[in-house]
Image (spheres, rainbow, N blue to C red):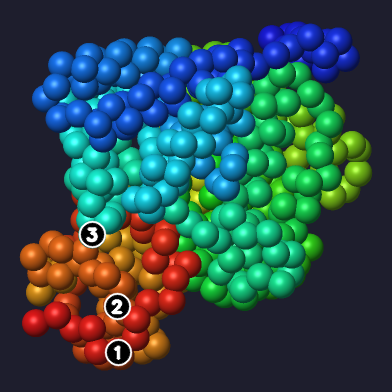
Amino acid sequence: MSEKVSSFGHEYLVHAVTGTAKNPILEQIKNQGAEVVLAVFRLVKIAIVHHIDNDAVTQTIERTHRMIVDFCATVGMNASVTFADDTVFVCGQLLRASRGTYGSALELAQLLEKCSISEVSFEAAVTPDDLKELALVLSIAIRDPARRTFAVDAPLMHMTLRRKDPVLTKRERPSALPLKDRIVRMYASALVVMRQFLMHVASGATVLPQRVKRLGQSIVSLSETGDPAMLGMTAMASTHRDDAGRAVHCAILAVVTARKITNDRLSLARLATSALMADVGRTLVAGSERYERLVKLSHDEEERIPAATSELCITTGGVNFPNALRTAITYETTWLERSEALGPVYDGIWTPLIQARLLAMVRKLVDLVAPRDTSDARSPLEALRMLAQDPEHDAVLLKALVRAVGVIPLGSVVELESRAWAVVIGESRNEMALDRPKIAIVTDPNGKTLPKPREVDLGADKGPAIVRVLGPSTAKFNVTRLFLAAPQKGDARLE
């Protein structure tokens, strides 16, 4: 092991013992989050009272714009405000605010709830004109009960409004929930668990929480059902592009793909845990100031990641056979991802484990669909094609991946020959029609969103043909939601 990596390991062990490390990004979110919430609240309130071109509205828009842009620049991510019952989150963190400010936040939640909105997110590139458009559509929707869905369906730039999802606010026992609700709960819980774990890793912690291991087991158990909603959750990859979201998406995709090769629960659980742990080295190298940002590490830092990953895996899991295998999988996976710079694993003397090769391929797919930097996102179909053209990937594993996600992958947004738009939600009952999957039609030929998505099995029902797969930035609707609701069945062909 290099002197560079050894000194690095000593550094994070010191942090773990002293407990002095803090996460400045989370502190900034907690300190400034209340100001963002208040700014949005004031913008919505004044837009309801005054005409959109009123000077007071204009001044409020300018102040809100400065607040949001400064906040995004400080924390290095989009500014998001989420409401769940009486709880308010800013960028996924509980709102820290005075009683008066929290009361204003809850009043904002009530106003947005009238429009069926539970989250509003702003990109750093948002402009005053974008905020003016937001204020206009919200004021119209709030004032006119007949147009309550006007805002959530509006084509806003550099902003995202998310519909209220009652599933996330229920309090039933997980075992009593319907399957799709259990999958949503698992996904939401997984994000929280992994974000907390990686935050502690970035601060120097060296203890693997039992909840991470149980999370891997939950992914394996739910994958046994074969419900398309499991893969449908990976459509959230472009939204949750942090290391925690990436770990969860890779674990789901790796397990679903591995099921095409084996049904051994122990092997699948080990693979799931390895996928969840595969970014701990990068988190550790990035440190508490950068691990949540979509930043590119230097060449020297990238070289340290495989060794740092194995160090932390051994430290957190102990010296035993199961953990030794998980450590080998994560070490080889992180090396394979950097083989162009580092050369072959083990200097080409030994072949990497099949689990590592599978995980590296899955992680490459997620990187293409939801890059961690500012690169253009690829559609699921385009990402699969790029993997197929890469001779480094095992043909057998690639075939298993295609069988798992489909020739036209689940979550792909497609245009039909009728000019309607649809989302691929599953395989056709006709095993010979691999290029004609089951879809949910979401718009009519004129681009108007349908009240309820309508399900069509293109292979079995001989519905309209797919003419093209749309890019990931084209769709203005929540793809994942289609996997969680029961589409309206029947002949949905649009003439």
Nearer-N-terminus badge (1/3): 3
Q: Quickly name the residue at label 2.
A: 454
Q: Which mark is residue 490?
A: 1
The single residue placed furthest to the front in the displayed view is 49
State which quarter of the image contains the N terminus: top right
Residues at marks 1 and 2 touching, judged by CB atoms closer than 8 Å:
yes
Kindly report the distance in space between the C-alpha atoms of the residues bearing marks 3 and 2. 24 Å
State which quarter of the image contains the C terminus: bottom left
Image point 60% across, 20% down: which residue? 98
Image point 8% across, 65% down: which residue? 446
Q: Quickly name the residue at label 3.
A: 146
Q: Position of residue 288 (x, y in %)?
A: 63, 17
Q: Report crowding for label 3: few under 14, some 14 to 19, many 20 or more residues within 10 A (C-alpha).
A: few
Image point 61% across, 16% down: which residue? 27
- Identify the secondary structure beneath mark 1: loop
Amino acid type for the residue under numbered disc 3:
Ala
- Identify the secondary structure beneath mark 3: helix
Nearer-N-terminus badge (1/2): 2
Q: Nearer the viewer, residue 145 or 380?
A: 145
Q: Position of residue 127 (x, y in %)?
A: 21, 22
Amino acid type for the residue under numbered disc 2:
Arg
Up the image or down, 432 lies above or below 74; here it is below
Q: Quadrant of residue 443?
A: bottom left
